[in-house]
Image (cartoon, grey):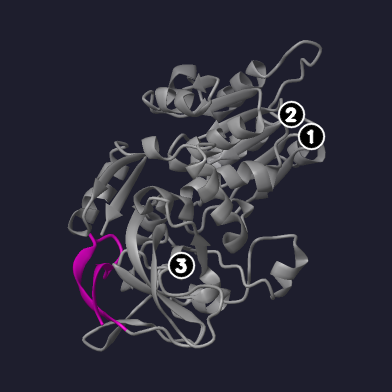
Amino acid sequence: MDVRAAVAFAPGKPLEVTTVKLDGPRAGEVLVEIKATGICHTDEFTRSGADPEGLFPAILGHEGAGIVVDVGAGVTSVKKGDHVIPLYTPECRQCPSCLSRKTNLCTAIRATQGQGVMPDGTSRFSIDGEKIHHYMGCSTFANFTVLPEIAVAKIREDAPFDKVCYIGCGVTTGIGAVINSAKVEPGAKAVVFGLGGIGLNVIQGLRLVGADMIIGVDVNPEKKAWGERFGMTHFVNPKEIGGGMAELVAHLVNMTKSGADQVGGADYTFECVGNVHLMRAALESCHRGWGQSIIIGVAGSGQEITTRPFQLVTGRGWRGTAFGGARGRSDVPKIVDWYMEKKIEIDPMITHTMPLADINEAFDLMHDGKSIRSVVVY
């Protein structure tokens, strides 16, 4: 079938909206009509050429929502007409990782997913007979896409596509990092580095679990009002502190001192930018003995993180998280429920909507810092 898609033909170039051929679902696969898709920084990371695993030409996009319109042989967990969210982190419930219950990083289709193809090693997308790569197993920058059955989460039918598509990445990553990865407890002190789409959802997650002190860090002064809207209690602009990372760390540690505890440092910090220097600052802003720093942001190819071993041997923990530690088919429907029950907010973060033809404008808005999340509505 012919579908409309925004294709990344080469790194660093604008996407080209054109007609591509999409083959139907094979065994264990589903055909989904994408109704809306968010534009995430990870899409830009790959489009820019900074992603070491980036493949071209490809149909990017991994933050979508839509309706199942056809299923391949053997599919039992979803049927035609079901509303679903594509999952770039699948949940097969059978691989060693899924069975371990220690991680959400299902390995069932990781190898082929990284090669930009379906589990059988082939692509469903093409132009004039030439293969177009899938992206993160999703490719939601097309109005129809084919996904493995284990990479779709069935959701309730009254949830609006143009809002819950954001749960396919940003919302789940931020809130999940708090609940699943850090396991933040009520009364905790936390610092969030970067108040974009991920950072605001981390703040929202911290508020949800009852954190007491939520410090947001961002060089854009306009993010102060955004952070406060979602539960931030204190705002720090590094430009106003002056100096470098050491001065920023000292300032944050001093902010978190209280009462008999004059050591200072946050119980939890979250790096949501992908800046290796901020990752170090986040770790060193943790409380000695028990502080935990969670890396969410993705750094560029070849970049490395460093710190003095002293920071770790004195009890700080450094760890990363993917998709907020969420198990897609199990957890995503619950987060959709939280949104519908008004336990979390999404609507204010959708700052721009547009048709597929204007998708490159979404990347411009992202670069200019004018959007939290842009959504393409098909």
270 displayed left or right of 221: right
The verdict on residue 8 being magenta is yes
Q: Distance from label 2 to label 1 (Cα)? A: 6 Å
State whether residue 336 is above or below residue 119.
above
As rendered, which of 98 and 330 lies closer to the eye? Answer: 330
Residue at 39%, 51% in the rendered image: 40
Q: Please, which residue is most extreme toward the top here?
A: 259
> Looking at the picture, which amino acid does disc 2 mark?
His
Q: Secondary structure at mark 2?
A: loop
Circles 2 and 1: CB distance less than 8 Å? yes
> Looking at the picture, which amino acid does disc 3 mark?
Met
Residue 326 screen position, x and y as percent: 61, 55
Q: Residues within 10 Å of mark 1 (few under 14, many from 20)?
A: some
* Quadrant including the C terminus: bottom left
On residue 136, the disc is: 3
31 displayed left or right of 230: left
Q: Secondary structure at mark 3?
A: loop
On residue 287, the disc is: 2
Residue 280 visible in the current orientation = yes
Q: Distance from label 2 to label 3 (Cα)? A: 36 Å
Q: Which residue is mark 1?
A: 290
Q: Tell me which segment is drawn in magenta.
A: 1-22
Q: Secondary structure at mark 1?
A: loop
216 displayed left or right of 257: left
Residue 84 picture quarter: bottom left
First reached walking from the N terminus: tag 1 or tag 3: 3
Callout in the foreground (1, 3) = 3
Residue at 57%, 60% in the rendered image: 328
On residue 228, the disc is: none
